[in-house]
């Protein structure tokens, strides 16, 4: 650890360095799935209401349609369950918002309710890792609904429209499972193979080699967890398990691995409509591809353990949303819900990411209002044009947001402004002015809340993760020292160590983006990771299908995939 302790000011400046914050990245490999799904889920309800002359009711079908944005990375058995929870959260949140709107029109009360709901949505989505898009979509819907004029007797009918649209969105999300039942498993296995191949290409040395095994190990663990959640071990899934073992062997012996083979398998999985038959045949003809391995059970922490680390971020969300909404009211801007949503969208895993998101949000919204200004003359002429522009913006948002948040935001902004046109045409200049003002207020106040509410336990969590990783490594090393360790015990130790290393890297990355904690033990983290990955490699070699029975020395040619 460096003896020089950085000052709070220098740590803050380091966190706020905005290098590359607006630079587009590579798109998600499934960007088209949420983009197409949201269009297919929104179009039938919107066009039906258009034909009936009740497009004003689209503000109640749209929340249900947006459920189609979730769970595209989950296997279909798990996706059905996750989408059901999303539907429950969306419909329940909307119902509470409409009830509040029917009881009072006091903006101070409504902003307070919206801020509390945003904090609860943040806590639940982060604790359960439901995302992307996480809590922002839920907060966008509930905060906007709080300010929609409402009568108590109208609430059941409006909630019923949302539920009907959500049921259709659930069906849209599940429909790809009919022609491609193994799609999510194939994609996540392909990502793991690519990550392992990237690490193998470094031969375990060179620039970036210290972070590469952590990234590859995280990808492999995610793939194992996805397969475990997928259901029965069919021949297709056993074939994918066989490839994941090859990825683990590559992590154990990068210098003896052909990265081209891993990339070729990843390409084959990514481009095929199903698991390639040649891989399935190999899995069926051979022994159980897991051998002594078992699919990792993952980390099952109690709710208290999941929520405790999130407390600062939940408080930041509640405080930021409430103060942003209050500021909007005091300034007389007129759309406090937009300020609340902006503040809710900012809070990320640490202060550095929150600052980056603030910049992206402001830039995206400013560009987005210009897009709305260009579309405004068109949508004022025809309701058909209004619906088509809304669908186009929804598609663009999901197509671009994985490249950079601000790119998606400049499509989300006109979409949000177009929704306000469902109840009747409004002056474009007024909408644009209010949107820009509320964005600036929400971003400034929301980020100020992140500065004030300090995550004081970030360093403590890093030290806890270090202790857990060291304990797991020592346990695995003791088993490796035995001449013939029990395979099940050694495999359990492997899983525990792999989980601990992934958790250590995630915790250290999150803490490094905060400005308040004292100096973090970065060198100790690095040493623990290096030692942990060496021990993990030894356990994989002992358990691997081609490993020698009892030699714990260096990895041999037999470890090649």
Image: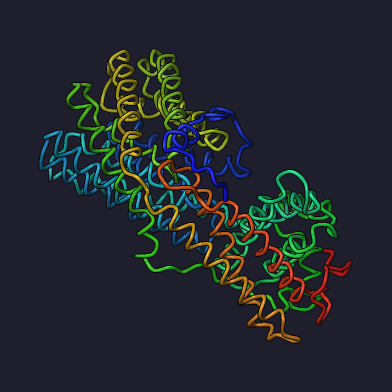
Taking the spot 57% from the left edge, 55% from the top edge, the residue there is: 505
Image quarter of residue 149:
top left
* Residue 423 visible to the viewer: yes
Taking the spot 57% from the left edge, 29% from the top edge, the residue there is: 20
Q: Residue furthest right?
A: 557
Taking the spot 76% from the left edge, 86% from the top edge, the residue there is: 483
Question: In the depicted view, which residue is nearer to us: 511 or 383?
Answer: 511
Number of marks in picture: 0
Residue 430, compared with residue 12, is above or below; it is above
Rendered-image quadrant of the C terminus: bottom right
Question: In the depicted view, which residue is nearer to us: 38 or 193?
Answer: 193
Image quarter of residue 254:
bottom right
Q: How is the image coloured?
A: rainbow
Q: Residue 179: percent from the left, percent from the top?
A: 62, 55
Residue 537, compared with residue 315, is above or below; it is below
Q: Is residue 1 left or right of residue 63?
A: right
Q: Is residue 444 left or right of residue 291?
A: left
Q: Residue furthest front?
A: 3
Q: Is residue 471 left or right of residue 7?
A: right
Image quarter of residue 327:
top left
Q: Residue 81: percent from the left, percent from the top?
A: 44, 62
Q: Residue 145: percent from the left, percent from the top?
A: 25, 38
Q: Residue 368: percent from the left, percent from the top?
A: 43, 22
Q: Is residue 197 left or right of residue 79?
A: right
Question: In the depicted view, which residue is nearer to us: 107 or 511?
Answer: 511
Residue 20, compared with residue 8, is above or below; it is above
Question: In the depicted view, which residue is nearer to us: 277 or 491?
Answer: 491
* Residue 58 visible to the viewer: no
């Amino acid at each position: 650890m460096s003896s020089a302790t950085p000052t709070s000011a220098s740590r803050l400046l380091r966190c706020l360095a905005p290098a590359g914050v607006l630079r587009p990245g590579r798109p998600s490999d499934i960007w088209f799935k949420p983009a197409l799904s949201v269009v297919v889920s929104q179009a039938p309800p919107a066009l039906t209401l258009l034909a009936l002359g009740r497009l004003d009711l689209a503000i109640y079908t749209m929340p249900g349609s947006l459920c189609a944005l979730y769970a595209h990375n989950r296997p279909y058995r798990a996706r059905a369950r996750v989408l059901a929870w999303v539907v429950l959260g969306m419909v329940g949140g909307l119902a509470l918002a409409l009830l509040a709107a029917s009881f009072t029109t006091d903006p101070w009360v409504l902003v307070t309710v919206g801020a509390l709901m945003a904090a609860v949505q943040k806590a639940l989505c982060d604790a359960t890792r439901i995302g992307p898009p996480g809590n922002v979509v839920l907060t966008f819907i509930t905060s906007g609904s709080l300010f929609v004029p409402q009568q108590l007797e109208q609430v059941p009918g409006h909630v019923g429209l949302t539920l009907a649209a959500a049921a259709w969105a659930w069906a849209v999300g599940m429909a790809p499972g009919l022609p491609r039942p193994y799609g999510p498993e194939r994609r996540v296995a392909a990502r793991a193979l690519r990550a392992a191949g990237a690490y193998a290409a470094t031969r375990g040395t060179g620039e970036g080699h210290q972070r590469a095994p952590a990234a590859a190990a995280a990808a492999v663990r995610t793939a194992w967890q996805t397969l475990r959640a997928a259901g029965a071990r069919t021949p297709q899934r056993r074939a994918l398990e066989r490839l994941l073992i090859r990825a683990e062997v590559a992590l154990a012996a990068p210098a003896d691995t052909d990265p081209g083979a891993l990339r070729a398998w990843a390409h084959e999985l990514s481009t095929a409509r199903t698991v390639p038959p040649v891989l399935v045949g190999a899995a069926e003809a051979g022994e159980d591809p897991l051998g002594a391995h078992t699919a990792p059970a993952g980390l099952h922490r109690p709710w208290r353990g999941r929520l405790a680390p999130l407390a600062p971020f939940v408080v930041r969300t509640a405080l930021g949303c409430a103060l942003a909404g209050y500021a909007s009211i005091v300034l007389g801007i007129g759309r406090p819900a937009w300020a609340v949503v902006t503040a809710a969208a900012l809070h990320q895993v640490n202060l550095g990411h929150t600052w980056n998101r603030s910049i992206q949000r402001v830039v995206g919204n400013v560009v987005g209002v210009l897009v709305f200004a260009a579309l405004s003359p068109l949508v004022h002429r025809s309701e058909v044009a209004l619906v088509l522009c809304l669908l186009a913006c929804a598609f663009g948002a999901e197509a671009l947001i994985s490249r950079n948040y601000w790119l998606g935001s400049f499509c989300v902004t006109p979409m949000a402004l177009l929704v306000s046109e469902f109840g009747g045409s409004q002056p474009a200049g007024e909408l644009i002015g209010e949107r820009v003002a509320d964005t600036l207020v929400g971003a400034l106040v929301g980020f100020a809340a992140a500065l004030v509410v300090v995550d004081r336990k970030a360093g403590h969590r890093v030290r806890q993760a270090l202790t857990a990783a060291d304990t797991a490594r020592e346990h695995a090393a003791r088993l490796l020292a035995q001449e013939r360790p029990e395979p099940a015990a050694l495999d359990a130790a492997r899983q525990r160590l792999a989980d601990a290393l992934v958790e250590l890297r995630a915790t250290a990355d999150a803490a490094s983006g905060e400005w308040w904690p004292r100096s973090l033990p970065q060198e100790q983290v690095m040493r623990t990771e290096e030692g942990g990955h060496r021990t993990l490699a030894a356990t994989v070699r002992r358990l691997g299908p081609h490993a020698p029975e009892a030699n714990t020395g260096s990895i041999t040619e037999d470890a090649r995939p």
